[in-house]
Amino acid sequence: MIRSDWTVEEAQAIHDLPFPYLIHRAQDVHRRHSDPTVIETASLLSIKTGGCPEDCGYCSQSAHHDTGVKATKLMELEDVLGAARRAKASGAQRFCMGAAWRSPKDRDMDKLCAMVEGVRDMGLETCMTLGMLSPGHVERLKAAGLDFYNHNIDTSPEYYREIATTRTMDDRLETLDRVRKGGIRVCCGGILGMGEEVRDRIAMLVTLATLPAHPDSVPINLWNEIGNTPVQKRAKPVDPLALVRTVALARILMPESVVRLSAGRTGMNEELQALCFLAGANSIFVGDALLTTGNPAAWQDEDMIGKLGMRFAPAREKPPRLPPNEIVEPVQRYDPS
Ligand code: SAM
Ligand code: DTB
Ligand code: SF4
């Protein structure tokens, strides 16, 4: 039974289990819901980089911090489709297009929708992350065939106000609600290593696991260090085993969600990534770039997955499309019987 009524105390108790019990429980949940040998793949492209008006203290693309990232205009359709073709050829299942915006401008919607349609026609799943969306934006993106929308809550509700002041956690939740109600699948997770306490990580996961429906994808990012940002002053390295505990907790609280081991893999050895897969992570970003930072090379990931006797999920020829008015209903409450 899928629960959406987790409390922080329950989650903390699971998180703190002796490691063998925690991993056993995460494995048990994982095997009941998915093939534990399969890893999903997504490829990222920054379609509009830098110059963002938001002041997110962790981000290289905020105009508030002097990070050296140059602002660009929204990419041309053909260039985006070229990148998607290369991602498809290298085996990615999903193509995620990110823009450094607070929210998209109405004048950009035609181009964004053409990107979604073009990428979809190649047989890739489509994902966008563009900032806050109005109901009209959701409707247009859905009509164009957008499969997933990424919008992270990033940390606990309490710590959120320490890392961004130009928007609130409630603003994020409002967009997530619009996306879900509009029938676009939700991709929502956060970042570890921004100076938060372990309880903030647990509260973040409980926030996700008590949404009206669990996010379909939950990206777990390690903060990729960006110089000259407010987070650089408060960041603390994440203990590798603490990362594994966070992944295991995400798996246990949200059994059907795809948990993506996201930013930060360049600093992780294969052993740590293998432990994260044992804890229930079942997706990664592939390709040597994220948005403005690096990612392991394709050959390294292929080598690692091969050595583990695991496999990448095959790309689907035509991803299924939710009917326009499908609303993902709230997850049922726990029935102990
Ligand atoms: N502007 C949009 C937004 O904020 O939703 C989309 C792009 S934004 C870069 C997407 C996500 O990337 C953020 O929510 C955050 O979780 C992640 N991110 C940004 N900078 C990061 C960093 N330095 N390390 C790890 N994750 C990061
Ligand atoms: C997510 O959770 N991680 C991705 C994707 N969603 C958009 C972004 C990671 C960005 C890492 C920092 C950078 O490359 O600028
Ligand atoms: Fe802008 Fe997104 Fe970076 Fe925040 S995380 S500064 S909204 S690009």
Image (cartoon, rainbow, N blue to C red):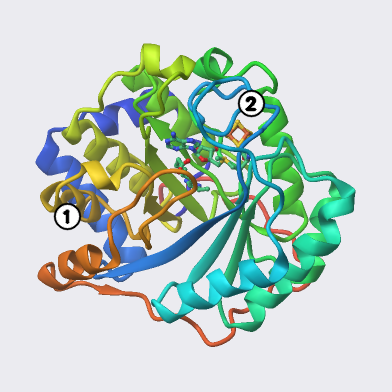
Q: Residue 128: x, y in percent?
A: 63, 56
Q: Which mark is residue 274?
A: 1
Decide which of 3, 97 is in the foreground and name it.
Answer: 97
User: Pointer 1: residues within 10 angstroms few (<14), some, or many (20+)?
Assistant: some
Residue lying at 80% horizontally and 54% vertically, measured from the top left:
138
Q: Nearer the viewer, residue 320 or 123?
A: 123
Residue 70 placed where, x, y %?
58, 37
On screen, residue 224 above or below 111:
above
**Above or below — where is 335 with respect to 195?**
below
Mark nearer the viewer, 2 or 1: 2
Instruction: Dividing the image into four quarters, tell me where ligand 3 lies.
Output: top right
Secondary structure beneath label 1: helix
How many numbered marks, from 0 up? 2
| Residue 332, x across and y down, in percent | 57, 51
Q: Residue at x 33, y 52 (%)?
A: 295
Q: Amino acid at mark 2?
A: Ala
Give the residue pinned by disc 2. Answer: 63
Residue 20, labelled with which disc?
none
Q: CA distance from mark 2 to mark 1?
A: 37 Å
Secondary structure under badge 2?
Answer: loop
Write the residue at 69% across / 41% down: 131
- Mark sitting earlier along the chain (2/1): 2
